[in-house]
């Protein structure tokens, strides 16, 4: 009897929740000088990024998976007649989605979803697909329901230091200097598949994280209570715990999942970045 297999690229940052839910993770690659390493938590880990940046002053780069990687994956997973639903980070951020689409065109029963998101914003959608498979829904029905959920994902992060964004060409030296001088902590919101600057917080990072969570969860009537991710890059334990405690204070989610962002997200945001990611009841 055929089954539905859920796969995702590594940027969904599901950590142990991928294996626990039977999700096949396809790593993107991080380039450290002349080395290209799989973002699979084995060949390279986020601490390697921090060491590289401190040593060289330069950011690593990330690479999309080529068409062949997806062709080989889909061929292996469908050889017994199984169907595949694959999740990619937003096509606005990487060509890996388009490459997966090209590969999928060679097969029957392979569906590729552009999450229009990143990190656990994509992870939310992956876990919903897992739930629907367990409920016995057909692949086409799952894909349609996921597409309806995509605009309901509320994904954002508050960043302590703009150094990595500056090195990556995503903010000017003037903006970086001003933010550091004034102790501004910008919030980056994912909207329409892209990252946009949102509100700026000021002061101690732990205080800013609390204010950020309070803001995000203030409109309680609009929040879907099923699940929230608290996802971070090497935040201090007290900062992370402040975020978790504030989430619990604000809203009674069925499930609070805490994950550490992988190397792809770390490369772009740097350390001390934290986000709360969840569904709204209606489109954002």
Image: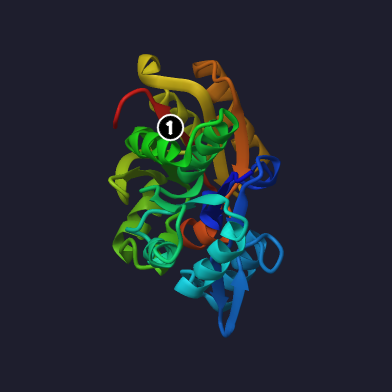
Q: Position of residue 162 (x, y in %)?
A: 42, 56
Q: Is residue 236 above or below residue 26?
A: above
Place of residue 217 in the rendered image (x, y in percent of width and height, measured from the top left) = 42, 23
User: What residue is at 50 percent from the left and 38 percent from the top?
Assistant: 124
Q: Nearer the viewer, residue 11 or 125?
A: 125
Residue appearing at x 61%, y 42% in the figure: 259
Quarter of the rendering containing residue 240: top right
Q: Where is residue 135, by image quadrant?
A: top right
Residue 105 spot, x, y in % from top left? 39, 63
Q: Nearer the viewer, residue 49 or 111?
A: 111
- At 44% across and 37% down in the image, what residue appears? 142
According to the image, label 1 marks what residue? 212
Front one among 175 and 122: 122
Residue 272 place in picture, x, y as percent = 55, 49
Considering the image in quadrants, where does the C terminus appear?
top left
Q: Secondary structure at mark 1?
A: helix
Label 1 neighbour load within 10 Å: few <14, some 14-19, many 20+: many
Residue 253 appears in the picture as rendered: yes
């Amino acid at each position: 009897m055929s089954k539905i297999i859920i796969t995702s690229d590594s940027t969904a940052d599901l950590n142990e929740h991928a294996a626990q839910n039977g999700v096949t993770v396809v790593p993107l690659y991080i380039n450290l000088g002349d080395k290209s390493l799989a973002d699979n938590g084995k060949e390279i880990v986020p601490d390697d990024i921090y060491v590289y940046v401190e040593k060289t002053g330069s950011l690593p780069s990330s690479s999309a998976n080529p068409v062949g990687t997806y062709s080989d994956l889909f061929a292996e997973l469908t050889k017994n007649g199984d169907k595949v639903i694959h999740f990619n980070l937003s096509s606005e951020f990487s060509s890996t989605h388009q490459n997966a689409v090209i590969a999928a065109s060679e097969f029957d029963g392979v569906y590729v979803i552009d999450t229009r998101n990143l990190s656990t914003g994509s992870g939310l959608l992956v876990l919903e697909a897992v739930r629907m498979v367990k409920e016995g829904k057909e692949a086409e029905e799952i894909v349609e329901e996921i597409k309806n959920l995509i605009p309901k994902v509320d994904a954002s992060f508050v960043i302590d230091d703009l150094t990595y964004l500056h090195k990556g060409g995503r903010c000017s030296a003037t903006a970086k200097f001003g933010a550091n001088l004034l102790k501004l902590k910008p919030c980056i919101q994912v909207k329409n598949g892209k990252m946009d600057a949102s509100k700026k917080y000021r002061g101690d990072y732990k205080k800013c994280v609390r204010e950020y969570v309070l803001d995000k969860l203030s409109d309680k009537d609009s929040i879907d209570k099923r699940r929230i991710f608290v996802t971070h890059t090497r935040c201090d334990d007290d900062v992370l715990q402040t975020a978790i405690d504030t989430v619990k204070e604000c809203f009674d989610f069925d499930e609070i999942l805490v994950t550490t962002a992988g190397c792809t997200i770390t490369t772009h945001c740097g350390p001390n970045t934290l986000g709360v990611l969840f569904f709204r009841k209606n489109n954002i």
